[in-house]
Image (spheres, rainbow, N blue to C red):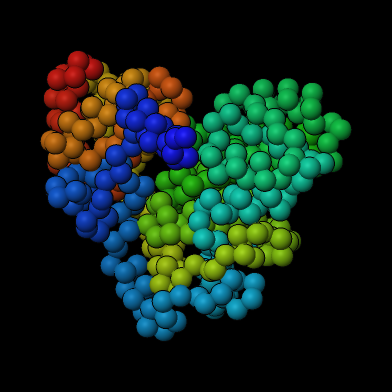
Amino acid sequence: MGNKFDFISERLQQLKDTGLYNQIRTIESSQGAWLDVDGAHVLNLCSNNYLGLANHPKIRKAAKQALDQFGAGPGAVRSIAGTMSSHLELEATLARFKHVEDTLSLQSGLCANLGAIAALVGEEDAIFSDELNHASIIDGSRLTRAKRFVYPHLDARGLRDVLEKEGKAVKKKLIVTDGVFSMDGDLAPLPEIAEVAEEYNAMVMVDDAHGEGVLGDHGRGIVDHFHLHGRVDIEIGTMSKAFGVVGGYVAGSKSLIEYLRQMARPFLFSSAVTPPDVAACIAAVKVLEASDELVKQLWENTRYFKERMKSLGFDVGHSETPITPVMLGDEKLARAFSGRAFEEKVFAQAIGFPTVAKGKARIRVIISAAHTPEDLDFALDVFKRTGKELKVL
């Protein structure tokens, strides 16, 4: 009789043999344009620190002050004894920033998706989801036991067709989409989706994790970018990407947020975000409210890098955002490219199956406002040399 865990070692070996094994590196410094990683000082091209806020002095100061005032932990779930005044301040600050009536802060963007979807629809209802939506949307949808219908990526006409065929007899309908798709950097056609939703009396939910701090006035996100305030019912956000801290939230009407305070399971059954993190989140939002200089710098860096990567001959997909997929196709090639780049002091991780479809492996580069022109030129030179060495160019 074999060991009952033989399947684990067998599966791990399969991952290594097929180039799908993910080498998880260790960061040994604060986040920034350059990092200490596994003993090497390397240029950071793969964190979600879009605006460089993760180590911003105002944000560090706010976290330290909150630690002294409120302590390290909340001590309870929000619904019993874990809601502190700072949690309410964060929610009011986010509501003002997002131009919505209210927000609910949670432990992560993933928790926000799980909590909102599972609270809003049930087994008598239906969810209509873009085929490339984030895993947290997929998992949240499964929790509901609702009927689930997938429409073609970015295809509002396809969404209408599915709603026409499957949605008429359904009690409640929820259309859910990523705002910015994290692997390809493309945008959901949110104006067209809102139009379809109004036609079929469906709720609209957008996960704006990679849009906040990037799109819209002062980085207010995709709803602001498309001037759709009041036409998108539920906005899901994360504080762990452009805001540089940790946590998530749901933004919408007062009645929606009041309902989620009573029904969202991550809010009810998991301890609140820590006081230092909450204070840091508040400070990050205020930095963006005060100035859009970092957002403008992010886009200037993005245009510069993409234009030069294209001129070198790289396929950077159809991204409309600072997410820049360097398409390589083969998983082993992508791992080899990432490894050689790291040896040349560029930290740019390979992304393969199951995060993306088989045969769609890539190096996902994420540009930051923290990068200087010299940083970007350094990266471009390494990509050029590595591309020629591995016969990508």
175 sits to left or right of 209:
right
- Where residue 332 appears, as percent x and y from the top left, is 29, 23
Q: Nearer the viewer, residue 284 or 289?
A: 284
Q: Is residue 331 above or below residue 202?
A: above
Which residue is rendered at x = 42% and y = 81% of the image?
71
Residue furthest to the bottom in view is: 69
Which residue is rendered at x = 70% and y = 30% of the image?
149
Residue furthest to the right in view is: 169
Quadrant holding the C terminus: top left
- Where residue 179 appears, as percent x and y from the top left, is 53, 40
Q: Nearer the viewer, residue 273 or 372?
A: 273
Could you tell me if residue 226 is visible in this image? no
Which residue is rendered at x = 33% and y = 20% of the image?
330
Q: Is residue 225 above or below residue 350?
A: below
- Where residue 150 appears, as percent x and y from the top left, is 65, 28
Which residue is rendered at x = 40% and y = 52% of the image?
242
Residue furthest to the front in view is: 1
347 sits to left or right of 325:
left
Q: Quadrant of residue 312?
A: top left
Q: Is residue 123 above or below residue 364?
A: below
Could you tell me if residue 7 is visible in this image? yes
327 sits to left or right of 343:
right
Q: Quadrant of residue 347?
A: top left
- Where residue 137 appears, as percent x and y from the top left, is 59, 42
100 sits to left or right of 45:
right
Q: Is residue 306 above or below residue 51?
A: above
Q: Nearer the viewer, residue 21 or 132?
A: 21
